[in-house]
Image (cartoon, helix red, strand yellow):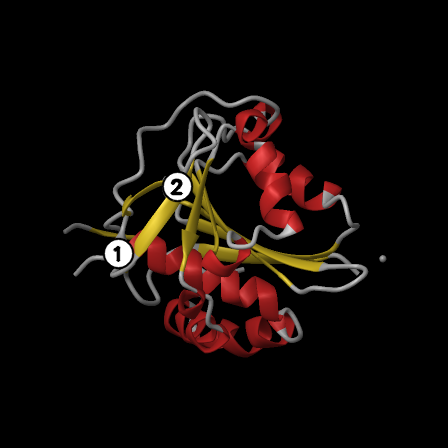
Amino acid sequence: MSSARRPSTSLTTDTTSYLPYTSYEYTTTTSRPRTGRAGRLGTARPRTGVSTLGIESQRIICAVSESRGIAPTVGLAFLNLDTNEAVLCQICDSQTYVRTLHKLMVFGPSQILIVQSAANPKSKLFSIIEDSLLDLNSNLVTIDRRYFAETTGLEYIQQLAFGEDVEALKMAIEGNYFAVCCFAAVRRRAIFAVNITYNNRSSNSLS
């Protein structure tokens, strides 16, 4: 297994072995789930609506988590497997999740991870993402909630950040529980299912 640089991480907040689980994948070609172990991501493919960012040919995976309420809070974490960059977002969204869908459309992830409990019964966010898979050109993958762990996300940031950046990053992510949980899930997916590792405190800093 080859080592790669660890991901640099940015946070945007809207306020002004093998991964041992069975997953269900909801693909762009069928609405019926197929059961099986999560495998290696497919090759990069053309995307629409993101050409201005220059990421249309890059491999990106995403994790999504939400709170329940009248105005739902949605956490997202995107991990670019080609540039080793991560972006964490936490959004106060509407009942139609238009801002969440916009983020997904901009970054164009090939896989979107979501907790299994959101699929049965289907949450509104799950249904909206599932209905948008053709437009997003993505697969929807459910994983166990235990992989969305805030403590694990914080540990990953502690391991990957340069020592002088850790405290500033902890302050930046304070209160962004769902974004940190998503970072834990998406990095674990990269390590165990996509077979990518990162050197601790290597040349690419968290930002």
Residue plotted at (57% across, 50% down): 122
User: Which residue is under mark 1?
Assistant: 192
Front one among 133 and 202: 133
User: Which residue is under mark 2?
Assistant: 25
Residue plotted at (38% across, 46% down): 24
Would residue 169 be visible to someone looking at this image?
A: yes
Give how far across and how far down residue 45 sits, in percent.
Answer: 40, 23
Tell me if 96 is positioned left or right of 1 in this view: right
Q: Label 2 neighbourhood size at 10 Å, few (<14), some (14-19), many (20+)?
A: many
Could you tell me how far apart the alpha carbons at marks 2 and 1 are, in whole angstroms?
17 Å
Front one among 200 and 67: 67
Q: Nearer the viewer, mark 2 or mark 1?
A: 2
Q: Label 1 neighbourhood size at 10 Å, few (<14), some (14-19), many (20+)?
A: some
Which of the 4 quarters of the picture holds residue 185? bottom left
Residue plotted at (56% across, 71% down): 169
Give how far across and how far down residue 95 sits, in percent.
Answer: 78, 49
Give above or below for 62 relative to 143.
above
